[in-house]
């Protein structure tokens, strides 16, 4: 039995990308392989009901030096008491090096050692992460390992939240909606309202959003009769179960879209400034991802001067309700009330 510690402290989508390593380790070294994670408190909740992960060390403040961080010292102390066979650091920032150097592990994988190779890769983030750990698993294992989430069982959440047997999830918010600037990833509120109105008579609709996002969703009210509002009402493991039981999910480029792709739930992702082929929901052999884009010449422009100088967010505004609705209606034809 080997013990592995994985360090990934990014946002929700970043941690979901990293979950491909869990099955890869289990396939390569056996089901008894012990896997621990270092993650942020919010994203780390993904693993609360995942039997593949033994323990999650929560690291809230990533930049605080070790001598001032109880969290970092606890990770080091645990590794000293029970050294890891392998430490896989999936963080590219130098700020993690003091911590990973101090952790007790027989073998350490650090992305900064592969930086020159990684910079030449033009691939999805999932494939870049797989490139990082490819030397500790076989090629055959690497090729059949993909992001996968395990949360509350779909049938259990169906009973717990009194959900219909068949439903479509709409996830209008994203992690940038609280920031004091133009939300480049957002689709206009009136378009979400129009989409909900068009589809709610054809298939039951569930609206999801995180705790603390209630003010954003007030702008979309009132919902049509029969729409199920679960905004701020679910834990992350329950949300995984709700998404895994859905017929499909509609979202912008945000964490819930990645959750859908990692539970093999069909996902319709409305994407403008971000590069879908690099950071969008991952298309594997067992899931279906629809990227809906206005295909403007200036897209993708994420983190470039083009985005910084953009004042109108045309790449998202030019995605029409008609285009989104038709994509959903065409793909889900058998599940819709005609």
Image: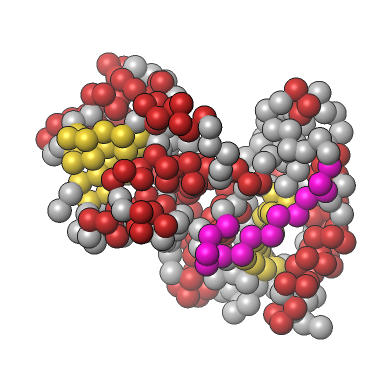
Q: Is residue 95 left or right of residue 102?
A: right
Q: Which residues are magenta?
A: 283-296
- Residue 107 in sight in this render: yes
Q: Residue at x 36, y 59 (%)?
A: 140
Q: Is residue 186 left or right of residue 42?
A: right
Q: Residue at x 85, y 28 (%)?
A: 311
What is the chief secondary structure element of the magenta stretch?
A: loop
Q: Quadrant of residue 310?
A: top right
Q: Is the residue 248 above or below the residue 258 in the image? A: below
Q: Residue at x 54, y 55 (%)?
A: 259
Residue 145 coordinates in the image, percent (x, y): 41, 57
Near-viewer residue (212 or 167): 167
Near-viewer residue (91 or 180): 91
Residue 14 coordinates in the image, percent (x, y): 50, 42
Near-viewer residue (218 or 245): 245
Q: Quadrant of the C terminus?
A: bottom right
- Residue 194 in sight in this render: no
Is residue 26 a member of the stretch shown in magenta?
Answer: no
Q: Residue at x 84, y 42 (%)?
A: 296
Q: Is the residue 136 above or below the residue 110 in the image? A: below
Residue 87 coordinates in the image, percent (x, y): 27, 37
Residue 246 coordinates in the image, percent (x, y): 59, 69
Q: Is residue 145 left or right of residue 188?
A: left
Near-viewer residue (305 or 80): 305
């Amino acid at each position: 039995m080997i013990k592995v510690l994985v360090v990934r402290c990014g946002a929700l989508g970043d941690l979901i990308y990293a979950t491909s390593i869990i099955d890869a380790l289990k396939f390569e070294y056996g089901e008894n392989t012990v896997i621990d994670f270092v993650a942020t408190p919010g994203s780390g909740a993904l693993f609360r009901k995942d039997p593949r992960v033994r323990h999650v060390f929560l690291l809230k403040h990533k930049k605080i030096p070790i001598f001032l961080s109880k969290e970092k010292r606890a990770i080091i102390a645990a590794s000293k008491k029970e050294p890891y066979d392998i430490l896989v650091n999936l963080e590219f920032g130098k700020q993690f090096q003091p911590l990973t150097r101090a952790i007790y592990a027989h073998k350490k994988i650090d992305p900064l050692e592969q930086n020159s190779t990684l910079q030449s890769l033009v691939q999805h983030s999932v494939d870049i992460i797989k490139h990082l750990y490819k030397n500790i698993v076989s090629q055959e294992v690497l090729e059949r390992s993909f992001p996968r989430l395990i949360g509350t069982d779909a049938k259990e959440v169906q009973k717990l939240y009194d959900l219909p047997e068949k439903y479509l999830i709409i996830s209008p918010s994203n992690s940038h909606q609280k920031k004091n600037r133009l939300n480049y990833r957002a689709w206009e509120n009136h378009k979400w309202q129009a989409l909900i109105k068009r589809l709610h008579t054809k298939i039951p609709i569930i609206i999801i959003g995180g705790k603390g996002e209630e003010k954003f969703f007030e702008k979309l009210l009132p919902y049509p009769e029969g729409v199920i509002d679960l905004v701020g009402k679910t834990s992350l493991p329950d949300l995984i179960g709700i998404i895994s039981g859905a017929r499909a999910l509609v979202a912008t480029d945000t964490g819930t879209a990645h959750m859908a792709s990692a539970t093999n739930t069909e996902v319709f992702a409305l994407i403008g400034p971000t590069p879908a082929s690099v950071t969008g929901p991952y298309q594997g052999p067992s899931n279906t991802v629809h990227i809906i884009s206005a295909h403007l010449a200036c897209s993708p422009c994420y983190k470039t001067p083009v985005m910084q100088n953009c004042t109108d967010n045309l790449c998202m505004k030019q995605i029409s309700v008609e285009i989104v609705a038709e994509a959903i209606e065409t793909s889900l034809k058998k599940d819709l009330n005609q």
